[in-house]
Amino acid sequence: MSQPQKGICAEPNLHGLFLMFNVDEGKEAIIRKKLSVILDIFEHYDEEHYEGMVSGVIAIGSNYWVELFPGAFPKELSPFPDFSEYDRSAPVVPFDLFVQIRADRADICHAIGLEVCELLQGDVELVEQVKGFRFLDGRDLTGFVDGSDNPRGMKKLDVAIVGDEDPDFTGGSYIHVQRFQHNLDKWNRLSVAEQEMIMGRSKEDDVEFSSEYKATFSHSYKMSITDEQGQPVRLLRQSMPYGDMKVQGQYFISCARSAASFTRMLRNMIVADDNGDYDRLLDFTTAETGGAFFAPSVNFIKQHAK
């Protein structure tokens, strides 16, 4: 299998920097070369600061892929799914490039970000930059542990990395990104029991409720989907909280070997079922962006830089 980018299946970090770029017209050839240099920057900092657990991901937006790599197309790469119902929606805000930088030191994230932006200067517009951080023992700012259902160890590869089903893109990953803003004032007015009912798991010790006690409008219930054989379908989440004293939220990132998994989960969250149930967590958080990307293998990026 081609070598996946290290940041896709990396362990959680203390700090993250998320950069969204749009590329100037006609710069495709130079960008293909510079993406390979960005991988070299990641590798350099990883070797120089091995204790910092440095990793990165470069992903290309669904709308920009055909311009950057016109000769081949990942089988399932498509625009971000556009779902809305009443006041619930998943806005589509396409970007050309997504660069994720993560480490256990904020200064390293900053240094890598500076080098990446300096390298791309004159060829792109930096549209969005968000700093993420680990909160307490891996919790979202709602107070609940985030990513509890993530696969562990080598199982991450099975969930997040494209295999032989798409031979030209083995080692790649389908990436979906959303920036959510929480209404924590509203959320914190709920009792812990009410919060737990909405999440479908206990707050303090992060135990998922059994099916008989789990509400059909809970976040856990709506995120649980199965395949045709009844086996659970999972995503690898690399999300992090972000914010300051005025704005707080979650920078949601999912990695998967199939784009269809995220689409099904997002639909479950937003579109009410026959009983009128949707993901009640959406009453307390709002998606402000949404982008679909593909993170090709290291081999793919290096080969197309020539």
Image (cartoon, rainbow, N blue to C red):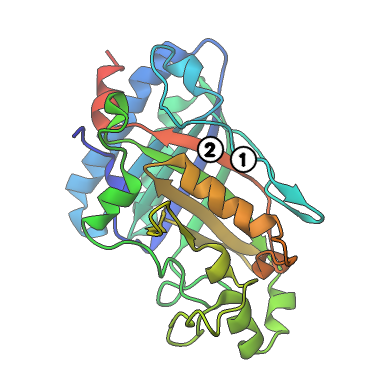
Q: Which residue is located at x 48 percent, y 31 percent? A: 77
- Quadrant in which the C terminus appears: top left
* Res. 187 image quadrant: bottom right
- How crowded pointer 2 is (Cα within 10 Å; few <14, some 14-19, many 20+) is rated as many
* Res. 52 image quadrant: bottom left
Q: Is residue 78 above or below residue 186?
A: above
- Work out whether mark 1 precedes mark 2 in sequence or the reverse, and give the earlier one: 1
Q: Is residue 282 above or below residue 304?
A: below
- Quadrant in which the N terminus appears: top left
> Which residue in the rendered view is the most extreme toward the right?
86
For disc 1, the marked residue is 81
Q: Which residue is located at x 77 percent, y 52 percent? A: 85
Q: Which residue is located at x 41 percent, y 59 percent? A: 230
Q: CA distance from mark 1 to mark 2?
A: 8 Å
Residue closer to the observer: 303 or 44: 303
Residue 134 x/y as whole percent: 43, 67
Q: Are marks 1 and 2 in contact (CB under 8 Å)?
A: yes
Q: Can residue 98 be seen from the camera position used here?
A: yes
Residue closer to the observer: 40 or 145: 145
